[in-house]
Amino acid sequence: MAGAIKKITIDWSETGKTVYCIVRREADGYLLSDADGAFANAPADPFIALTEDGTIKGRYELSESRAVWSDGSYTVAIYKQAGGSPAPASDTIIGSGQMSIVSDAEVVNVLVSDKTGFSLSSTGADLILKSSTFIQAIVAAVNEYATYGLTALNTLLTSTGIKAASVPNVILANGAHGGAATVITLQTPIEANVASETNHDFTALQKTSLNAATPVVTVSDKTGFSLSSVGILAIWDYLTASFTGVIGSIGNLLKTNIDGKISETSKPGTAQTITPPADMALNSTVAKEATKFNPATQTVILAEGQAMIGTKVVIDEDAGTVKVYDGSNNLLNTYTKTTLGNVHTMTRT
């Protein structure tokens, strides 16, 4: 049955040599046989050849896995062969060593300097307790309980410093609880055994005191609260920078309608000239007729030396006239249109 690989290696100062080893199982003194890889009392050929590494010259090694090795210690002797066949009596031994095998694998001894993760066995703990002078003294005192009662144990605890021999007095400062240098003698401490700290609870009085010290506050209205300047700035930045895609939002309206600095916009003077849009009627009564003129494709000019001055203008597209009235609705002038292509010429009549 094939086993795991057991590695035997030696580095030597000479290259190209014939090197072999003898492996002995220390439990019974049997030698490893080169014939079948098993251990025997006196095998015919106990000389196992080592092969030199092809790259690392001077390194000779053996990988043995023909059989399972039992747990235990094994010794290895390595020789440099001088003649035509192995002769341990005359060949030079160039190395030796010991192998520890567990579960058919070599175990390497490790120096443990860190004790983390280790624990004492019950046997180890028992040895420590039995070797402790203090523990032995307690055991002796308990064993003598029938003769000495608890007095011996109390004396032992006092002598070892675990229990104080007496309770010290307390001297108060000046003016505290009865005046300067008042001596208060403390009572002997009362021992209490607490079996477990699980499922302990506060008393009703303690709960009332705790609730009074840390009241629960429920905020149901926002009266008395205010945003900090940082919070207000964060909201403004969100509305004007990140919320501009929602139609009708303040961010969208500001981005769409305010495209310049108000402080840099010129103010209108006292005398103003207002030019209405091309598709806006001059008077509501002629709104329908005014829309017939297309400024994109038509041009209107006045005859030479003529001007159109008035308060109200009425355009009669069908008659081809434009009538100008003053503020009292009196007719001032009538202009007749003549058309040449897309050019409309207005002549006062």
Image (tube, grey):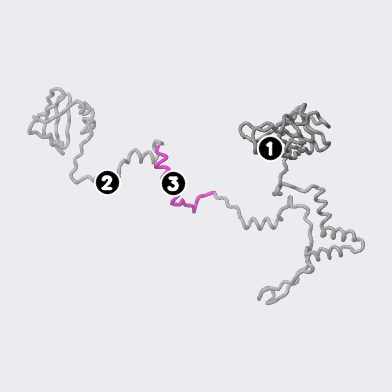
| SS at badge 2 | helix
Q: Which residue in the protein does label 1 denote?
A: 10
Q: Residues within 10 Å of mark 3 (few under 14, many from 20)?
A: few
Q: Is residue 206 magenta?
A: no
Left of 305 or right of it: where is 172? right
* 30 or 161: nearer the viewer: 30
Q: Amino acid at mark 3?
A: Ala
Numbered mark located on residue 197 in the image: none
Q: Nearer the viewer, mark 3 or mark 1?
A: 1
Q: Which residue in the protein does label 2 denote?
A: 264
Q: Position of residue 72 (x, y in %)?
A: 79, 38
Q: Earlier in the sequence, mark 2 or mark 1?
A: 1
Q: Amino acid at mark 2?
A: Glu
| SS at badge 3 | helix
- Quarter of the N terminus within the rendering: top right
Q: Residues within 10 Å of mark 1 (few under 14, many from 20)?
A: some
Q: Position of residue 90 (x, y in %)?
A: 75, 36
Classify 343 as above or below 91. Answer: above
Q: Look at 9% across and 33% down and name the residue there.
A: 306
* 187 or 92: nearer the viewer: 92
Q: How far is disc 2 from disc 1 in space, using C-alphas?
A: 93 Å
The quarter of the displayed image where residue 31 is located: top right
Q: Earlier in the sequence, mark 3 or mark 1?
A: 1
**Magenta highlight range:** 220-244
Q: Amino acid at mark 1?
A: Ile
Q: Earlier in the sequence, mark 3 or mark 2?
A: 3
- Residue furthest toward the bottom? 180
Q: Look at 12% across and 25% down and name the residue there.
A: 338
Q: Which residue in the protein does label 3 denote?
A: 234
Classify 123 as above or below 36. Answer: below
Circle 3/circle 1 CB separation < 8 Å: no
The quarter of the displayed image where residue 166 is located: bottom right
